[in-house]
Image (cartoon, rainbow, N blue to C red):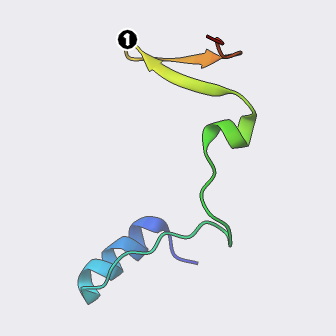
Amino acid sequence: MKTRKERRAEARMNRTKFQPKYNGSAPKTYEKMYGVGYERFNTKYVTIKEALKK
């Protein structure tokens, strides 16, 4: 199996659109994968444990 880098280079040489592989499913967000959200704050990632309700 070729690496992502090799597949990208091959797509460029063949002038075709690069199609990433996700093992048969769509890419998952961080929240779906780990059950918590995250947000970027002052160049650091901060974990959000619960949402504020207004």
For this orientation, the residue located farthest to the right is 35
Q: With respect to residue 38, does 12 lie above or below?
A: below
The foreground one among 50 and 28 is: 50
Quadrant in the rendering for residue 42: top left
How many numbered marks, from 0 up? 1
Q: Position of residue 16 (x, y in %)?
A: 30, 85
- Count residues near mark 1 (Cα–Cα under 10 Å), then give few for <14, some for 14-19, many for 20+: few
The relative height of residue 29 versus residue 9 in the rendered view (above or below) is: above
Query: Mark 1: which amino acid?
Result: Asn
Q: Is residue 15 above or below residue 5?
A: below
Looking at the figure, which quarter contains the C terminus? top right
Residue on which disc 1 sits? 42
Q: Helix, strand or loop at disc 1? A: loop
Residue 7: image location, x then y, percent: 42, 75
Residue at x-position 44% and y-position 75%? 19
Residue pushed farthest front? 54
Residue lying farthest bottom?
14
Q: How far across and down, in percent of the image, does residue 5 sit?
A: 40, 66
Q: Is residue 20 left or right of residue 47?
A: left
The quadrant of the picture occupied by the N terminus is: bottom right
Residue drawn 66% across the image and 36% down it:
31
Q: Residue at x 38, y 17 (%)?
A: 43
Q: Give the image location of residue 27, x and y in percent.
A: 59, 57
Q: Residue at x 33, y 80 (%)?
A: 11
